[in-house]
Image: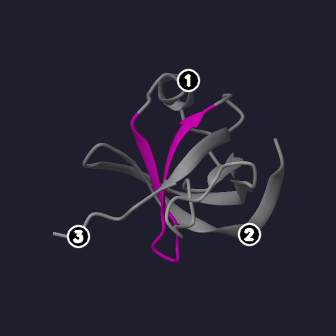
C-alpha cells in the first residue's frame, strides 16, 4: 500500500460528539491518500485518511472519549474529520468527511 502525504496542518478546532460541541482543542494532523486505490470515473477516489494528535491534556473525559466512535473535529479552515482517539495521550486516526449543507 503506497500512502502519500497530502498535507499537514496545525491549529485550534472544535470537537463534537454528534451535535454536541465538547470543547475547542489544539491539533496537529497529517492527511494521507492511498495511491493504490483506483479512481472511479475521474473522481479523486477515497477521502484522505488522517492521523495526528489533539490536545486532551487535563481533561477527565479523555478516557471516556477513547471509547466514542462518533467524534468530529472541525478544523480552522472548515474541513471536518471523523475520528477516534487511539490513546489517552490524544493520538487520533480518522477520515475526512464531506460537509453537509443545510
Q: Circle 3: is it few (<14), some (14-19), or many (20+) Cα within 10 Å?
A: few
Residue of label 3 = 101
Mark 3 vs mark 1, foreground winner is 3
Q: Which residue is mark 2?
A: 7
The answer, for residue 83, to whether it is visible in the render is: yes
Could you tell me what secondary structure mostly forms the magenta stretch?
strand
Cα–Cα gap, marks 2 and 1? 29 Å
Q: CA distance from mark 3 to mark 1?
A: 32 Å
Q: Quadrant of residue 59?
A: top right
- The image position of residue 60, as x and y in percent, is 53, 30
Q: Does the segment drawn in magenta span residue 31?
A: no
Q: Where is residue 82 shown, x and y percent of the image?
A: 47, 47
Q: Which residue in the structure is indicated by mark 1?
A: 63
**Disc 1 residue crowd, few under 14, some 14–19, many 20+, Cα 10 Å:** some
Q: Which residue is drawn at the image coordinates 54% and 70% (left, top)?
A: 42
- As helix, strand or loop, the secondary structure at mark 2 comes to strand
Task: Tell me which numbered mark, 3 or 1, is placed earlier along the sequence.
Answer: 1
Please tell me which of labels 2 and 1 falls first in the chain.
Answer: 2
Q: In the image, which residues are magenta?
A: 70-85
Front residue of this view, candidates 8 and 61: 8
- In which quadrant will I find the C terminus? bottom left
Given residues 48 and 64, the one toward you in this image is 48
What residue sits 70% from the left and 69% below the top?
9
Viewer can see residue 57 = no
Question: Image quadrant for the N terminus?
Answer: top right
Q: Quarter of the image holding residue 84?
A: top right
Residue occupying image coordinates x 70% and y 68%? 10
Which one is in front in this view, the residue at disc 2 or the one at disc 1?
A: 2
Q: Is residue 97 left or right of residue 48?
A: left
Amino acid at each position: 500500500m503506497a500512502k502519500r502525504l497530502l498535507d499537514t496542518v496545525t491549529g485550534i478546532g472544535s470537537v463534537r460528539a454528534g451535535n454536541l460541541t465538547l470543547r475547542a482543542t489544539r491539533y496537529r494532523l497529517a492527511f494521507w491518500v492511498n495511491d493504490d486505490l483506483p479512481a472511479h470515473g475521474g473522481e479523486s477516489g477515497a477521502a484522505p485518511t488522517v492521523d495526528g494528535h489533539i490536545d486532551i491534556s487535563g481533561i477527565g473525559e479523555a478516557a471516556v472519549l477513547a471509547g466514542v466512535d462518533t467524534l468530529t473535529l472541525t478544523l480552522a479552515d472548515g474541513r471536518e474529520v471523523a475520528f477516534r482517539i487511539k490513546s489517552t495521550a490524544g493520538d487520533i486516526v480518522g477520515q475526512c468527511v464531506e460537509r453537509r449543507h443545510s
